[in-house]
Amino acid sequence: MSLAFAKTAMMLKPPVSGNEIEAYRTELAALRVGIIGAGRSGMACLRLLGRLAAETVLADVKPLEELRAEAEQAEALGAAVVPEFTQLQQLQRSQRRATAGSRSSASWS
């Protein structure tokens, strides 16, 4: 789970009614989320957030050659991919390139 997602999830109350569920989805969709790790959990998080239209960046320490399948899946969902990830600044640089003219103006949390 990404830091921004975890931080936001802790601040949100669990939804109870249909209107609250819709409001919760809207809040998630407005996020820019860095997902660190392209394993099962990271890819599941990417698919979920992709369905909600959140801006996502998938980062992993592996080189692109080893992430080919995951990178293709991420890009099909509109996510940027950061191979050989070692520093949080890489997410910010990738996000700026990937979202030039993007639908959202939210900042990284």
Image (cartoon, rainbow, N blue to C red):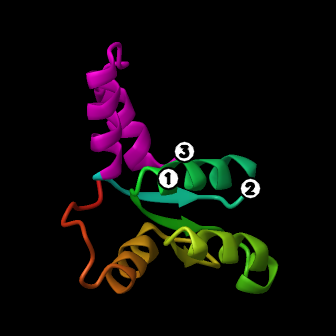
How many other residues sit within 10 Å of disc 2, few (<14), some (14-19) or many (≥20)?
Answer: few
Give the label on residue 82, or none: none
Q: Is residue 56 magenta?
A: no
Characterize the magenta stretch by its predominant secondary structure: helix
Along the polypeptide, which appears first: circle 1 or circle 3?
A: 3
The residue that disc 1 covers is: 51
Q: Which residues are magenta?
A: 1-29
Q: Is residue 21 magenta?
A: yes
Where residue 6 sits, quadrant-wise, is: top left
Q: Quadrant of the N terminus?
A: top right
The residue under the point 43% across, 71% down is 91
Q: Residue pushed farthest front? A: 18
The residue that disc 3 covers is: 1
Give the residue type that dot 3 points to.
Met
Give the residue type that dot 2 points to.
Gly
Along the polypeptide, which appears first: circle 2 or circle 3?
A: 3
Q: Of residues 72 and 35, which is closer to you in this image?
A: 72
Question: Of helix, strand and loop, which one carries label 3?
Answer: loop
Question: Can residue 62 be seen from the camera position used here?
Answer: yes
Tell me the distance, in whole angstroms, between the alpha carbons under discs 2 and 3: 11 Å
The residue under the point 43% across, 47% down is 3
Where residue 9 sits, quadrant-wise, is: top left
Q: Is residue 42 left or right of residue 27?
A: right
Give the label on residue 39, or none: 2
Q: Of residues 34 and 86, which is closer to you in this image?
A: 34
Q: Residues at badges 1 and 3 in contact (C-beta under 8 Å)?
A: no
Total label count? 3
Q: Is residue 12 above or below residue 31?
A: above
